Amino acid sequence: MPRPIRVLIVDDSASVRQSLKEVLESDPGLTVIGMAGDPYAAAERIKAEVPDVITLDIEMPRMDGLTFLQKLMSQHPIPVVICSTLAERGSDSAFAALEHGAVDIITKPKLGSREFFQESCVRICDVVKSAAQARLKRRPVATAIAVRPKMTADAVLERGGSAMIQTTEKVVVVGASTGGTEALREFLEVLPPDAPGIVIVQHMPEKFTARFAERLNGLCQVTVKEAADGDTVIRGQALIAPGNRHTLIKRSGARYLVEIKDGPLVARHRPSVDVLFRSAARYVGRNAVGVIMTGMGDDGARGMAEMKQAGAFNIAQDEQSCVVFGMPAEAIKLGSVDRILPLHAIAGEVVRICR
């Protein structure tokens, strides 16, 4: 049996530290080797034993989490998952943490219904396990700035429906997880203003996606916005699935639109890439282009296989440019990928195919 992933929890709240410890150790694949109330205590703990993953709060006494993260990534890179209430608001500090090398962001565990708490546990444990597989590079110090069964997309998609092929308008669907925030930025930044309509699922906390879309919109030539129910998929616009809501593509006459809906976790996620991809297979068919990017697990692999069967053209990010080569690898194993490309080449290939 493989050794459990060793986690160090860094948070100034004793109650949060204890709650997070209980959540993480509910998974037999994880063990908490220590807890620290601030970065100085964390640094001393790391000297004694180097963890596989650190969960890190941003707002702490003596030294804030961002400063600690920058020092860590410049001296001794260790996968870091930000666990902060700031993540709930999609704050600039949370995005800065990703830019400084944090692998992912989770919100602090909360009390709620039993189902809500179980889903929260699944998400937190999955993110930490994914972070342990991340490929990290040393970064120079920047200038200041209980396991539930997997559900399939059948739990969300309606029965029936099929793609009409009497249109040449292309639709691009993209799925990403760990490392995806930076990968999506690189992909979207170089697209021309008349790029084909794009719908994206990035595994991300609720309320975080609106701010993420806003930030990307300020960097890109295409318009980027958080998807709303009934939004039309149009050229020059990228729609990002809202956190904690499934996003599907539907067809109404000659118009493609998105549907936002609730539902169970699919492939352990909500939103799920499988839900988006399988809806594209049904309603977009051969007019779809699928892109699967960095991330742990197999969300999107089955949906991409259905897209391939429906005549879509599919692209996977290559292993060398992925933070975690899980989702692309699973899609490749199923034979559903037409081209494997480094991240920097994906946008150009998408434009070429759609033209």
Image: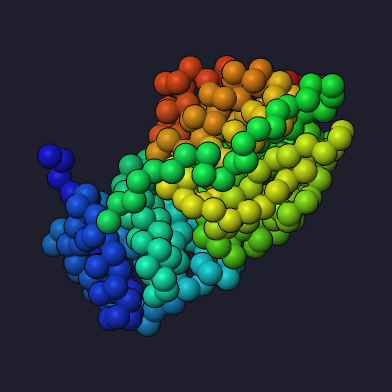
- Image position of 195 (left or right of 304): right
Q: In the image, residue 77 lies at what x, y percent?
A: 33, 51
Q: Is residue 18 above or below residue 340?
A: below
Q: In the image, residue 36 lies at what x, y percent?
A: 25, 73
Residue 326 image-quadrant placement: top left
Tell me the residue at 33%/42% (across/down).
133
Q: Is residue 148 above or below residue 199?
A: below
Tell me the residue at 51%/35% (across/down).
300
Tell me the residue at 48%/30% (across/down).
301
The quadrant of the rendering that contains the C terminus is: top right
Tell me the residue at 24%/67% (across/down).
22
Colouring of the image: rainbow
Res 73 visible: no
- Circle count: 0
**In this view, which residue lies farthest toward the front?**
159
- Image position of 185 (left or right of 6): right
Res 173 visible: yes
Residue 9 image-quadrant placement: bottom left
The quadrant of the rendering that contains the N terminus is: top left
Q: Is residue 281 above or below residue 208?
A: above
Looking at the picture, tell me which residue is in the foreground, 81 or 152.
152
- Image position of 268 (left or right of 307): left
**In this view, which residue lies farthest toward the right?**
254
- Image position of 294 (left or right of 162): left
Q: In the image, residue 23 lies at what x, y percent?
A: 28, 64
Looking at the picture, tell me which residue is in the foreground, 77 or 17.
17
Q: In the image, residue 130 lies at what x, y percent?
A: 36, 46
